[in-house]
Each structure stands twice: as C-alpha cells, then as structure tokens.
Image (cartoon, rainbow, N blue to C red):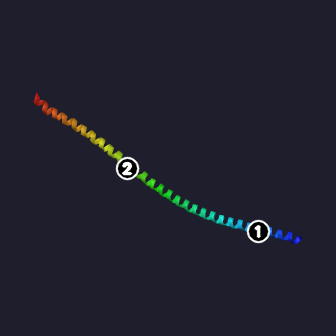
Amino acid sequence: MANASDGNRLDRIEENLAWLTTVVSNLAQSHQQLQTTVSNLAQKNQELNSTVTSLVQIVEIHQANHETSQRNFEIVVGRLEAIETEIRGLRTESLRIIEHLFGEQQE
C-alpha cells in the first residue's frame, strides 16, 4: 500500500512539475512579448520626439517669417498713408489752382 501511495504522490508531483513548466514557459513568452512591446514603444517615442522637435523648428521659422511679414506690412501701410496724405495735398492744391484759373475767368 505504501508503494501505491508513493506512486500516486509521484504522479501528482510530476503533474505539478509539468504544470509549473508550462506556467514558466508561458511567463517567459509573456516577458519576451512585453520586452518587444517596450522596445517598440521606446522607438515610437523617439520618433515622436523627433517629429515634435521638427514641428517646433517649423513653427519657430514660420513665427519669424510672420513677424517679418507683419513689420513689412506695417511699413507698407505707413508708406500708403504718407502717399494718401500727399495725394490729398496735391488734390487740394490742384483744386485751388483750378478754382483760381477758372474762378477768375467767370468774373
């Protein structure tokens, strides 16, 4: 009877050992998958950081271009205002000349 009990016990130990071997193998596979996932995520993170850096550089360039365009626009507006003032002055002067020339003829 002792032999049957020992045999039964050895069968349970072997079953447990087989189950533990399967569990360890599954854990090793899961660990490898996690390492691969982490490595892929690290690579994607590096790519995203590079993309963000590029976008920041592009924004800085466009900001500088916008500021230059804004200054140029303000200069053009200032010149247009000066030209407008000059045109008004010439118009007023022309009207006075016309009035002087034709006003005298009507008298």
Name the quadrant containing residue 7.
bottom right
The earlier-in-sequence mark between 1 and 2 is 1
| Local crowd size for mark 1, using a 10 Å CA cut-off: few (<14), some (14–19), many (≥20) | few
- Seen at 32% across and 43% down, the residue is 78
Residue farthest along the right direction in this orientation? 1
Q: Using the numbered discs, state the Cα–Cα distance from disc 1 to disc 2 in whole angstroms.
A: 76 Å
- Seen at 65% across and 64% down, the residue is 30
Specify the label residue 84 is tagged with: none
Give the residue type that dot 1 points to.
Leu
Task: Indicate the quadrant containing the C terminus: top left, top right, bottom left or bottom right.
Answer: top left
Give the residue type that dot 2 points to.
Ser
104 versus 90 height, above or below: above
Residue farthest along the top direction in this orientation? 107
Tag 1, which secondary structure?
helix
| Local crowd size for mark 2, using a 10 Å CA cut-off: few (<14), some (14–19), many (≥20) | few
Foreground of the two, 22 or 32: 22
**Numbered disc in front, either 1 or 2:** 1
Foreground of the two, 38 or 105: 38
Which residue is labeled 1 in the image?
A: 17
10 versus 103 height, above or below: below
Question: Whole-percent x and y of residue 16?
Answer: 77, 66
User: In the rendered view, does 58 fall on the left or right side of 45?
Assistant: left
User: In the rendered view, does 33 fall on the left or right side of 95?
Assistant: right
Which residue is labeled 2 in the image?
A: 69
22 versus 75 height, above or below: below
Question: Whole-percent x and y of residue 103?
Answer: 13, 30
Task: Indicate the quadrant containing the N terminus: top left, top right, bottom left or bottom right.
Answer: bottom right
Tag 2, which secondary structure?
helix
Question: Whole-percent x and y of residue 43?
Answer: 56, 62
Foreground of the two, 10 or 62: 10
